[in-house]
Image (spheres, grey):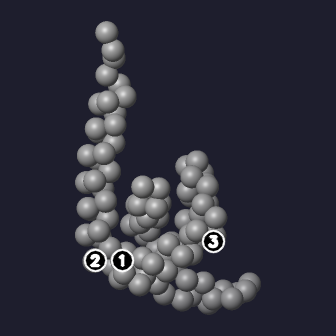
Amino acid sequence: MRKGILEFCILSVIKRGEAYPSDIAEEMKEAGLHILEGTLYPLLTRLKNSEMVTYRWEESSGGPPRKYFSLTEKGQSFYQELQQTWDELSGAVNTLTQTSSI
């Protein structure tokens, strides 16, 4: 389940606009989801190989070129599916956990 949630979170960040991996990790950290580079990069590679995201290279004046990721049309559709699944799951969990017992 965690892998699916991480993909959903990563796609949520990328959905707002092109994203550099360290920016994705930083945004997730600020939200309380600490993700290691050893986890992030394989997920980005898998999403790219599944044609959910694409990337472009940008030259950097202070180091190697950078990859900026963006969603593809297929990624947009997948994101919508994940959003619907999350809404259903979180609604069900909230219903179960907020029901008071007599």
Instruction: Farthest residue to the top: give it.
Output: 102
Mark 3 neighbour density, 10 Å: few (under 14) some (14–19) many (20 or more):
few
Question: Disc 2 or 1, which lies upstream in sequence?
Answer: 1
Identify the residue at image location x=31%, y=9%.
102
* 100 is higher (above) or lower (below) than 75: above
* Amino acid of disc 2: Lys
Instruction: Find disc 3 in the rendering and name its residue.
Output: 38
Identify the residue at image location x=35%, y=82%.
51
Left or right of 95, for residue 9: right
| Badge 2 element | helix
Residue 32 at what x, y percent from top left?
58, 48
Residue 52's mark? 1
Circles 2 and 3, Cβ within 8 Å, touching? The answer is: no
Q: CA distance from mark 2 to mark 1?
A: 5 Å
Does any portion of residue 72 appear in the rendered image? yes
* 48 is higher (above) or lower (below) than 15: below
* Amino acid of disc 1: Met
